[in-house]
Image: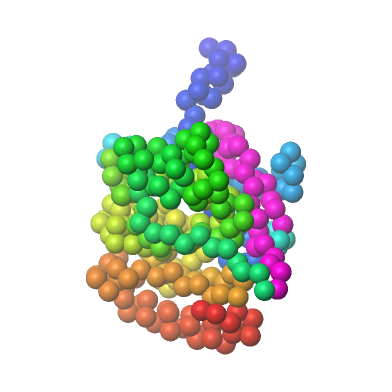
Amino acid sequence: MSLAVALTLAAMSASPPEQVHTAWGKTVNEISVEWVTQDPPGTSVVQWGLAQDNLNASASGDSVEFFVDEGRKWYTHVATMTGLQVNTVYYYRVGDSVNGYTAVFNIMNRRARKEGDPYRHIIMGDMGASCAFTICPACTQSSTVCDAATCAKNLTNVGLISEVATADQVLHVGDFAYDLQTANGTIGDQFFRNIEQIAAYVPYMISHGNHEDSPKNIAHFIERFRLMPSNAEPKEFMTLNGPATNSLYFSWDHGLVHYIAMSTELWFGITDGNTTLDTFIAWVKDDLDKANKNRANVPWI
């Protein structure tokens, strides 16, 4: 077999990166990106820059095999853009030399608002892959597919997609896809394909809901959102897929507000044996104490 044929076959068999979503990093100069490939990765890379045709910065991330879904394995990737200036639009793409790269997306790092102007946050919860009418009018009950191509065929001046250009962040307060594990995780895949048209452009911050309670669903939740800037203690949460970033509770600052994401399911027994209601209460007392001492800079909690 010739080298050209081998390379062509390799390209045809590669799984392109997809399901891109972003989150604030742990400093004001960072944004993290997570994506999925269905095939084993080469490397996990994010490239970014100030122009679409000049992605002159890059960072390597990591990949994790997800093996909980019966009969298939797939891979999450996380990488972080660093050294970002606030109130600046960056262009980026993710992928690697094995599976290829995504199209180029853009994202604003912490838009500066004029004094007196409000921040614009998208707050939502309980959204499935189907019945995701909030995204755009093309979303239906009969189909789980409501991705960018679907919405582009319909009205683009209503729904969540109409808010992307002006929103500062998304707050999705639990209950994703209905459910992330459904149909061997393929419903979770489609949900993230649908939400990419928003979450690739606006930091997509989340909290855990009761639909993410079962062992398989919480494994999906933890792995699919391991990009969150978690400051939880314990730092990791153990699922059927192994340990990953603990996103059952964490906090971050944006503008004048200190946000705390927390799972009320801890009151109903959700635990991995290490993260418990008691560890949350100890953590949140400490977090609130620190936030209260910082009221001069971030007055709202």
Drawn side of residue 7 relative to residue 286, left or right = right
Q: Which residue corresponds to the image point at 50% horizontal and 51% vertical from the top-left?
A: 160
How many marks overall? 0
Tell me what residue is drawn at x 57 percent, y 12 percent: 2
Residue 190, placed above or below residue 249:
above
Judge by depth and name the residue closer to the eye, 65 or 288: 288
Percent x, y for residue 19? Answer: 48, 43
Check the image and tell me how it is coloured: rainbow
Place of residue 31 in the rendered image (x, y in percent of width and height, measured from the top left): 60, 57
Q: Nearer the viewer, residue 214 or 120?
A: 120
Residue at far top of view: 1
* Residue 291 colored in magenta in the image: no
Q: Residue at x 34, y 37 (%)?
A: 143
Position of residue 291 relative to residue 64, above or below, is below
At 40% across and 47% down in the image, what residue appears? Answer: 133
Q: Is residue 62 visible?
A: no
Residue 276: x %, y % from top left: 31, 73
Q: In terms of depth relative to the viewer, which is nearer, 105 or 158?
A: 158
Q: Is residue 159 left or right of residue 222?
A: right
Magenta-drawn segment = 88-115
Residue 300, image x, y percentages: 55, 80
105 within the magenta span: yes
Asked whether the viewer can see residue 297, the reply is yes
